[in-house]
Image (cartoon, coloured by chain):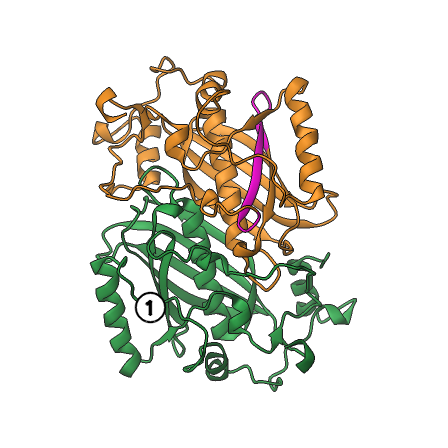
Chain colours: A green, B orange
């Protein structure tokens, strides 16, 4: 288990004074697999894969979700947008790579799921799809909470929206500049999201500075008449490491 | 759908200048069911009920979780602590009551689950139990994330911890003073929580002012050697309303 906090690691990196250099692999422009947005996208969002993509329409999607999905899908053809595939686990996204800082855990568990895909029953849990715009470093997440994400009766739990924001920040941060760990997440809730309806999350990378990515998010109804929440997130930039072949 | 934000409602309440009085039922000391902590606890945490309590030990609990649970259970006998039962839905907690502000949604869905009980398979999702100390207005949540709550391989998703914090804040806020809606949630992440291990969340109500409850939380390992995250949360005080008998 890592016993040194992210902030401390980041601070050491900023001052170029790492007391234990194995803690923080410094960022190199020419890493083993490159760190440009294009190469990150190519690796993280493979066009062909055997893994199931859960970010595809199903019969539970409400008409708003379905039509906005189609709009963005059109924009992937000419508008610079990319649809991010959503596999059952981050392990499938980062095949052949591993966390830095010696971050490993021993476990005999087998069935790992990324939290926002914890419920595989269509329409009951998280329904979402993320589109990313590499050159503008922004994302849009279409999010439809199901009845297993309830908080107040009939409405999504604030924590389910917090997690959806964190996950969208996370994918955006990684693809925009290898943002790997959430350092902070600040959310102001404005209105409740009715279960089964669409919330549109607009994420923007505001700046990348001192090995940190600063992002903002607004979650609102499709017609922008109802703001559900606004948030900001800060992620620490760290490169994934290559897994030795025998561990792959 | 409510189209006015929580903050605006709270602001109007603070200035006693409600433009549309149905939006915010003012707080009365003598409500239909009383608002003292004792009466809230008695209603929200029934000693006898037909609903299943999910905050009970099962074979997936790690030894740390189990032994700390037993310690707190002992404290419920003489130390002023209360174990909060955890039903599958908040609907079961607030039987006979409904949300204020006309907050209702139409839905034909049947199987509602509170987000933090979205996965009923023991050990795979959220395992947690909350203990509450009424006179000191503080809580402790024992949280063991399962493999369906993964973020980075082998570790809990930051969003799963955010949701756990929000849920523990929520229960604490309601029992401490009818805190009903999350206004803000600010989290600073320090270290990752290994899947399957115990995180202890210590929540404290810092103050109740201007119809808001201000709370703090620290999540750490049992031995307090590793801080996972620190957070603060603000909740809006609003009373639940009585449901007409025909809707119960």
- Pick the quarter of the image with the C terminus of chain B: top left
Residue at image position (63%, 20%) is B80
On whether residue A197 falls in the magenta region, the answer is no
Is residue B161 left or right of A105 when viewed as pictured?
A: left
Rendered location of residue A20, percent (x, y)? 78, 68
Nearest the eye: B93 or B5: B93
Say above or below: A214 vs B17.
below
Q: Secondary structure at mark 1?
A: loop
Rendered location of residue B66, percent (x, y)? 68, 38
Please rate how many residues cluster around mark 1, counting C-alpha atoms within 10 Å: few if below 14, some from 14 to 19, many from 20.
Answer: some
- Pick the quarter of the image with the N terminus of chain B: top left
On whether residue B128 falls in the magenta region, the answer is yes
Nearest the eye: B21 or A166: A166
Q: Quadrant of residue A8?
A: bottom right
What count of labels does the image hold?
1
Say above or below: A7 vs A82.
above
Q: Quadrant of residue B191?
A: bottom right
Nearest the eye: B36 or B5: B36
Direction right: furthest residue: A19
Rendered location of residue B127, percent (x, y)? 56, 43
Magenta range is B123-139
Q: Chain of mark 1?
A: A
Rendered location of residue B167, percent (x, y)? 48, 40
**Label 1 sits on residue:** A56
Say above or below: B102 vs B166.
above
Q: Can you see residue B193?
A: yes
Say above or below: A74 vs A152.
below
Residue at image position (50%, 34%) is B214
Q: Can you see residue A17?
A: no
Residue at image position (25%, 31%) is B23
Q: Quadrant of residue A16?
A: bottom right
């Amino acid at each position: 288990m890592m016993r040194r906090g992210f902030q401390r690691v980041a601070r050491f990196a900023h001052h170029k004074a790492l007391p234990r250099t194995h803690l923080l692999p410094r960022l190199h422009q020419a890493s083993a697999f490159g760190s440009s947005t294009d190469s990150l996208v190519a690796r993280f969002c493979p066009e062909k894969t055997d893994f199931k993509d859960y970010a595809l329409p199903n019969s539970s999607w409400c008409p708003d979700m379905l039509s906005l999905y189609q709009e963005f899908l059109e924009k992937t053809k000419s508008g610079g947008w990319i649809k991010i595939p959503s596999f059952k686990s981050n392990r499938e996204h980062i095949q052949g790579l591993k966390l830095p800082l010696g971050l490993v855990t021993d476990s005999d568990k087998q069935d790992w799921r990324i939290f926002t895909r914890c419920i595989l029953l269509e329409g009951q849990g998280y329904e979402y799809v993320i589109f990313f715009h590499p050159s503008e470093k922004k994302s849009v997440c279409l999010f439809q909470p199901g009845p297993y994400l309830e908080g107040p009766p009939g409405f999504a739990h604030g924590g389910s929206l917090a997690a959806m924001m964190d996950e969208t920040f996370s994918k955006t941060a990684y693809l925009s500049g290898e943002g790997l760990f959430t350092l902070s997440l600040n959310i102001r809730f404005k209105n409740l999201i009715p279960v089964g309806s669409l919330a549109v999350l607009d994420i923007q990378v505001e700046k990348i500075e001192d090995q940190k990515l600063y992002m903002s998010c607004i979650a609102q109804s499709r017609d922008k008449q109802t703001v559900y929440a606004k948030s900001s997130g800060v992620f620490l930039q760290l490169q994934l490491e290559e897994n030795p072949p025998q561990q792959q």
